[in-house]
Amino acid sequence: MNCCVVMSRHQWLAALASLIFALPAAADFTADPNDKRQISAAKAIEKMRSTISRSEQFFEDAYGIAVLPSVTRIGIGFGGAYGKGIVIEGDTVIGRTGFWQFTSGIQAGIRNFTMVLFFKDKEALENYKQGKIQFMGQAGLAVATVGIAGTPTFNEGVAIITMTRLGLMVEFSYSGAKFTYKADVKM
């Protein structure tokens, strides 16, 4: 009796394809220990994955991600936010990103949060790199370190999840946001 399993060429191809598609896209990058921005991003990813269970599927499905570990937002009627981070394609850091936001509406408080943008496919990431992605309108409540927000699914190839780090913010506001991208020249 033969103890070995013989697989057809089609079975081998199917097994190989399932392994390739099972690999995490942007979930397993390793931070450069000499780059503070990458270390902060790695810590933010780890914290989000352990704190917000619904984020896990986004990390697994994303073609690429932009991680802004610390975004600070202040608002009293009018407000603004600023943060910076890195962009990861697969498991490789490909550039730096920035976030600027102006808000108007019913809002009061200050908040510091982590923001991760998930790009469903290469096209969504390319649109981001070219500055074609903007988001407007938001509502939420953040108290101390409690508070999460984001899109429940991919919208035009992009999903966003934010996680409050510290602050108190109540809002129902209209906003204009600008994301910037700069390719990493150290690659």
Image (cartoon, grey):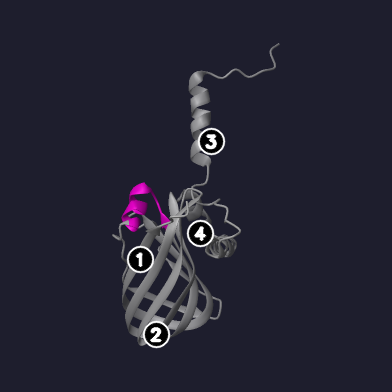
Q: Nearer the viewer, residue 54 or 85?
A: 85
Instruction: Please name the residue that numbered disc 1 is placed on.
Output: 179
For the image, the number of numbered tags is: 4
Q: CA distance from mark 4 to mark 2?
A: 27 Å
Please say if the residues under marks 4 and 1 sit with CB atoms less than 8 Å apart.
no
Disc 1, SS: strand
Instruction: Residue under label 2, please give it.
Output: 75
First of labels 2, 3 by sequence position: 3
In the image, residue 101 sits, relative to residue 60, either above or below, namely below
- Single out the mark in the foreground, 1 or 3: 1
Q: In the rendered structure, which disc, 4 or 2, sits on the residue that comes first in sequence?
A: 4
Which image quadrant is residue 118 in? Answer: bottom left
Q: Please give the range of residues in magenta.
A: 118-129
Farthest left residue?
132
Residue linked to disc 4: 55
Distance between mark 1 and mark 3 Cα atoms? 34 Å
- For label 1, count other residues whose C-alpha is less than 10 Å away and answer few (under 14), some (14-19) or many (20+): many
2 or 1: tag closer to the N-terminus:
2
Q: Which of labels 4 and 1 is toward the front?
A: 1
Mark 3 is on which residue type? Leu
- Category of crowding for the residue at label 3, using alpha-carbon neighbours closer than 10 angstroms: few (below 14), some (14–19), many (at least 20): few
Q: For the residue marked with disc 4, what is the amino acid? A: Ser
- Residue at point 34% right, 57% down? 128
